[in-house]
Amino acid sequence: MAQRFQAPVEALSSLGVIGILGLATVFGLTQWQSFQNYGKAKRFSVDKWDRYMMERDSRLTGNVNRQRCETEAPKAFSTNSAWPLEKPTIQ
Amino acid sequence: MTTHREGIFVDGLWVDKTPLPDSIPKVSEVGLTSAPLESIGFHFAAYCKPFSEDFMLCKNSTQDPEKCLKEGRRVTRCALDLINKLKANCDEEWKKHWECLDKKNHHLWQCRTQEREFNDCVFKKLGITKTIPDTPEGQTPVHLKENPFIK
């Protein structure tokens, strides 16, 4: 009205710096996680069912992140299931 | 053996390398990992219903695993048959669907477009529909809703 609107640079520049650093953190984390997981996002909310399926995936393909779409399993699959051995805590 | 807890203070892994005895007929195992298996879950249920019902009834009746091996072999053979048919007919749509599931944390609700194409292809070529059991009467199942609020 009387003068042109001046944006509050001093007040918003600090918020801008915080925002840019936050976005850089999120970006860096997602890039690191996808680097660790063969280019995919990390799996979250993994319950017991998903854990058992991922263990089966690792027995079929060698890694939980690799998927495989063949009809028949490799021959080693029928004998490579593993039982965890537990030591009794109280003798 | 059905309720199994994970080991605490696990000391190592034990692998039993002896194969099955020769008296048991050999059936190769299903070679699908979790994402393709999840996408064909309902189709497998519709296609192999009699075999899997026999297997589940057998399992419910006895604790001995040796008694249900025959029914288990039948289920495996039916599953292998279904996978071969899907690979022959609907391979691209299936591949798109399970690759989408693989990227989206195996959430079915995030891959509805690919799922619709896959279901259409499977219905057209093989005649199998996906039905969610125990859907109340008069309610559209969640995979058929248009623009749902709760996916």
Image (tube, coloured by chain):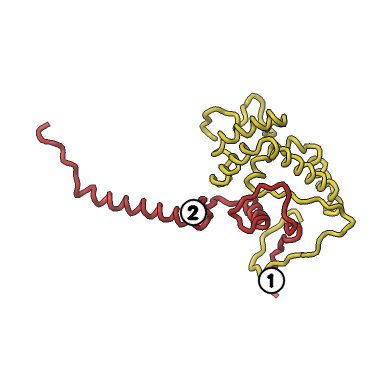
Chain colours: A red, B yellow
Subunit under mark 2 = A
Depth check: give the residue in front, B37 or A72: A72
Q: Which mark is residue A87?
A: 1
Residue drawn at point x = 69 percent, y = 65 percent: A84
Among all residues in the image, which is located at the extreme top? B138
Residue B46, quarter of the rendered image:
top right
Q: Which amino acid does label 1 sit on?
A: Lys
Mark found first going from the N terminus, 1 or 2: 2
Where residue B108 sits: x, y (%)? 59, 40
How many numbered dots are placed on residues in this image? 2
Q: Residues within 10 Å of mark 2 (few under 14, many from 20)?
A: some
Relative side of B136 to B74, left or right: left
Query: Do tag 1 and tag 2 residues touch (Cβ < 8 Å)?
Result: no
Residue A58, quarter of the rendered image:
bottom right
Q: Mark 1 and mark 2: span between their CA atoms? A: 36 Å
Task: List the residue tagged with mark 2.
Answer: A34
Determine whether the residue tagged by mark 1 lies in a helix, strand or loop: loop
Residue drawn at point x = 83 percent, y = 41 percent: B54
Residue B14, quarter of the rendered image:
bottom right
Determine whether the residue tagged by mark 2 lies in a helix, strand or loop: helix
